[in-house]
Amino acid sequence: MYDKYAALIFDMDGTVIDSLPAHQRAWEQILAKYQIPYTPEVMNQLNGWPALQTVDFLCDRANIKHLDNAQISAEKEVLYQQLAPKMVKITPIVDIVKQYSGKKPIALGTGASTSEATRLLTHLGIAGLFEHIVGSDQVEKHKPAPDTFLRCAKLLNVPSEQCIVFEDAQAGFDAAKAAGMTHFDVRTICKPSYFVQ
């Protein structure tokens, strides 16, 4: 089905791993601690954004100016890292990665940091399936900007228009489109598990 593409690029959270319940629990605890309002609809719209951008958006939306957003996002990430090893599982999308691993160039582009992504994928035994892992620390602008996926294509040495991106979030779809890449909505295979109403 994907043979016509020269390279495959995968998102991480909600795509190759089901980490969204762990992210949700971490967000619920942190946002409650700092009394930052949110709705499930808004959190789904922000799915795929780095933590600091998410906190910035929520605080701006609620006109909250007195908090240390960087500290809050750091606390959320620490909590998530504590929850992830016990809660995170691989998804059926990994079967596609395995099918093409070693046959086509494959990269992973995520809103998580490179070290966090590598650690988690290694824990799950799938880090070696990807030639490159591009985290949020490697680009200036994050999804929905195209930078993450453009860097993946550059590292794989494949033109953008010959890449297909596997994603579960609107920010990722927008990033793929902006990069000139085809995208596949993995929610047709993996049932969403993030702030389900």
Image: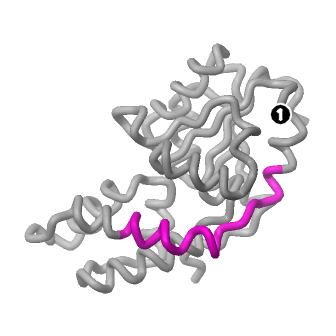
Residue 46: image location, x then y, percent: 44, 60
Q: Is residue 170 above or below residue 86?
A: above
> Which stretch is magenta?
76-94
**85 part of magenta stretch:** yes
The dominant secondary structure in magenta is: helix
Q: Identify the residue at horizontal 52%, vertical 42% (top origin).
A: 174
Amino acid marked by disc 1? Ser
Residue at coordinates 57% horizontally, 39% vertically from top-left? 109
Residue plotted at (28% across, 60% down): 57
57 in the magenta segment = no
Crowdedness near tag 1: few (<14), some (14–19) or many (≥20) residues, C-alpha within 10 Å: some
Instruction: Report x, y in % for residue 153.
Output: 60, 22
Q: Quadrant of the N terminus?
A: top right
Which residue is denoted by mark 1 in the rendering? 101
Indicate left or right for 69 with 49 as reference.
Answer: left
In percent of width and height, residue 102 lies at 84, 28
Tell me which corner region of the image, top left, top right, bottom left or bottom right, holds residue 124.
bottom right
* 41 or 16, nearer to the observer: 16
Q: Tell me if residue 35 comes above or below residue 141 in the rendering.
A: below
Q: Going 81% across and 25% down the picture, which residue do you hit?
A: 104
Quadrant (top left, top right, bottom left, bottom right) of the C terminus: bottom right
Judging depth in this view, the residue of 37 and 8 nearest the camera is 8
Q: Please, which colouring scheme is shown?
A: one colour
Q: Report the label total.
A: 1
Image location (x, y in percent) of residue 30: 34, 78
Task: Look at the numbered disc 1 and give the secondary structure of its residue.
Answer: loop
> Does residue 76 appear left or right of residue 193 in this picture?
left
Please identify the residue farthest to the left as the structure is shown.
66
Q: Is residue 29 above or below residue 95?
A: below
Closer to the camera, 81 or 56? 81
* For residue 189, side relative to residue 81 (left or right): right
Asked where in the image residue 155 lies, by quadrant, the reply is: top right
